[in-house]
Structure formats: structure tokens, C-alpha cells
Amino acid sequence: MKKTFVLDTNVLLHDPSAILRFEDNDVVLPITIIEELDRFKKQPEVTGRNARQASRTLDELRQKGHLTKGIALDNGGSVQVALCHRETLQELPAELEGDRADNAILAVALELMRQCECPVIMVSKDINLRIKADALGLIAEDYKTDKVDVDDLYTGITEVTVDGEDIDRLFQHGAIGLPQAFFPNQALTLVDVTKPNRTALATVDGTTGKVIPIAKIPRSGISRIAPRNREQNFALDLLLRDSVSLVTLVGKAGTGKTLLAIAAGLQKVADDRIYSRLVISRPVVPMGKDLGYLPGDIDEKLNPWMQPLYDNFDLIFGTQDPSGKPSHWRRGHEELIEHGLLQIEPLTYIRGRTMPNQFLIVDEAQNLTPHEVKTILTRAGEGTKVVLTGDPDQIDNPYVDAASNGLTYVVERFKEEAIAPHITLLKGERSNLADRAAILL
């Protein structure tokens, strides 16, 4: 049966194309949403951009007819802007009296429910508004179009029981075929069926589908960083593999996501010269209360945000000053910046850029929306490799959650693509305290 969906403003601020994503059903926008879009359009970054995009979409549809009468969409549905009648607004409970936008949206949904024979569903990302709608007898849902099932999120790793001869042939011939179906570049732990203690680490070649052993990491490590567990071995192998263009690393705090990505990037840029520059960026999203504007030029403003990256470079180069006086200690990454091999910048200025032949690392990608991740990935030029790292359990952006952030969205959408492997890191290696805190807290 055809349904009628009444949208909240936050749905359009999250996905400006949401009105086109309800298949052949009818979409109704209370007119108060237009007023709220006008209020949000001047805000910086993603919220204002999405508000402006939603307004442009409605303006384009307006050319096809009258929005208040409904405009047919190509998918068989329709879009309509509905007026809020004072009579219905006054029928709301006393606790919901007033001209608040939420109350106007509830009033429109209630009026449609009385008029329509089809189901009327209010869609909002505001939990409290959904609760109020349910209390008034309305069907209320979250906007789930871009959500993924976090509990079943693709890990990129699996164990396979094989004959001992298969493991022998893997190292003798460099590749074997297995009857099971795997995702491209999936990481495999091959376990000898007769000797469970005998294992081999391998991956699925994204082009041929053959199982190949992972590359052997030198004892000295990559950029002085050596993997400490199975997942880190898999991650470093994929980070160093030139045949893949996108690598996603998910893991709790201290699992080595950013450190491994930077170590591999330095190897490929400074030593192997495969890429012309290592570019590292992260979203400027505060944890807790924002401190406001920071003094100084752009480099001084960015220092507090980029300090976690500098910490990783200090660990790699061994440039932490034992005397505690950093002014007398040259930091290793500064020379790379001076020679044009390293660039550390915020994501604010990435729109419109084209980045060819670069190793791009986006840290804390769980704070990005799917739209922002799409913007980043479409900046990649010829020969560029992109690495997204993050932890869906450490989200500071109020507009996304573990199921709707850009990082998990990319993991789920790209899991069948040969150019985009993924690894979930499980074991914390920062310290025993950090590992126990991540588990217990």
C-alpha cells in the first residue's frame, strides 16, 4: 500500500536528497520546514550546505507545478508542502501548545492521518519528537536510508579451515584456489585441519579471486613501526598494496589505526616514491564543550586539533624531547613539510580540490556524514590512495551515530569492490591501561 511520509527538518539537514528516496510513496513537508531551512542555510560546514541543497531541490521541483498541490516525481511518488492549520495546532495537548516547529510538524501529521486512507508515517532523527508522535497515536520512524547494521558490520577478516597441503601449496606457488566464496581482498586466517596450531595469514586477490599470502614485513618494521598482532599484519599489508585505492580501518582506541596508516604513507611517499605527497586530515569536531575561536594564524589554530597526528610522528621519528623542552628539539615531520612531502590540514577546504598521486589519510572519519565522505572520495585524482580510519564508538558529531556515519557507510557499500579492502582492528596496543579502559568502560 502506498504510504505518506511526513518529514522533519533534521532529515533534510542530514540528507538533502531525502525527499527523493521514498520510492513511489508520497512525501509531505510541513511549511515550517521551509522556514527552518532558511534559518539553517547560513550556518557553516555541512548543516548550512545541506539546507541550501534541500532548498535548491525544492526550487527545481517548483518549476513543475504547485508544491502545495503536490508534484509528481519520476519514481512514482510525489512531494507536497503542507500548511499547518491553527485548528489542528490548538487540538494538541496543553503541554505541546505554542508555535514551535515540532508542534507544527505534529499537527500536519495528525491532520493527514485523519484525511488519508493510507498509512501516515512521521520521519525524524529527533528521538524526543518520535516519542511525542507515538504518544499522539502517530507512526514515527527514524530516517534509515543510509543506516547500516553495526552489529553485523563487515570486519574484513575470517578464519578458514583447510588441509595442511593447501598451506604448503600457498607458500610454494604463491597462490591457491579455495571453494568458498569470499569478498575481494578479504583477510583470511588459514587453519590446518589436522594441526590447529599451524596457521597462515593470507588475503583474497581482488582481481583473480585467488588466495595469496600477505607480504612479509621486515623485522625493523615499516617506518620503524612493526605490527604486533594478526589484524595489524593484515592492515599493513593492505595499506602497502598499490593495487587498492581505498582502505578503511575501524577499531577501538589504541588499536593502531592512525599509526599504521601514517607509517605506510611515509614508506610509500618518502622511501618508495610511489606517491608525491602524504596528506593527512581530520574533521574539526570537539569532544565536549567547544572552547570557541583559537588565537593565532591558521597553523596555530590547527595545532590543538592536529596534535594527535603530531604524537604519531614523534613516535615514528623518535623525536619526543626527553628534556621536556620541545623548542630545542626538531620535530621529524617539519622537514617533510618543508620539502613538500607532507601536508596536514583540516577537511574544511577540501571541496573543489583535485588530488592526484597522493596518499590521503582521513583520521576520525566516524565524525563525517556519508555526504562528506563522498565529497572526500570524489576529490581523489589519478593514482591517489585514500585511507579512512575511525572508531564508530567515539562519535562527537551530533548529526551522526554509529549506524549512519560516513565511515561505516563506506565499509558496507564498498565491501564487494576490488579496490577497497577493509580491516577491523580488535586488540589495543597503546598500553594495558588503555586497552582495559576501552573494554571495561
Image (cartoon, rainbow, N blue to C red):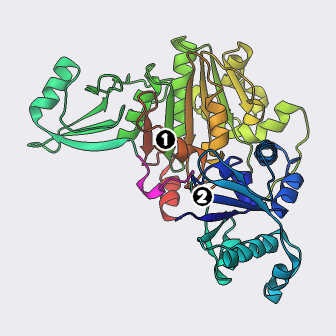
The amino acid at mark 2 is Asn
Is residue 152 inside the magenta stretch?
Answer: yes
Q: Please state the horizontal and vertical placement of residue 169, each as a whole percent of the image.
A: 14, 24
Predominant SS along the magenta part: loop
Mark 1 or 2, closer to the camera: 2
Q: Which of the two labelled residues, at mark 1 and mark 2, occupies the earlier sequence position? A: 2
Q: CA distance from mark 1 to mark 2?
A: 25 Å
Q: Please state the horizontal and vertical placement of residue 230, each as a whole percent of the image.
A: 35, 39
- Drawn side of residue 103 relative to residue 137, left or right: right
Is residue 399 inside the magenta stretch?
Answer: no
Q: Quadrant of residue 79?
A: bottom right
The amino acid at mark 1 is Arg
Q: Quadrant of the C terminus?
A: bottom right
Q: Is residue 114 above or below residue 406?
A: below
From where the camera sits, is residue 229 visible? Answer: no
To which residue does mark 1 refer?
Answer: 413
**Furthest residue to the bottom?**
94
Seen from the viewer's position, the closer of residues 312 and 167 is 167
Seen from the viewer's position, the closer of residues 222 and 171 is 171
Q: Which residues are magenta?
A: 146-154
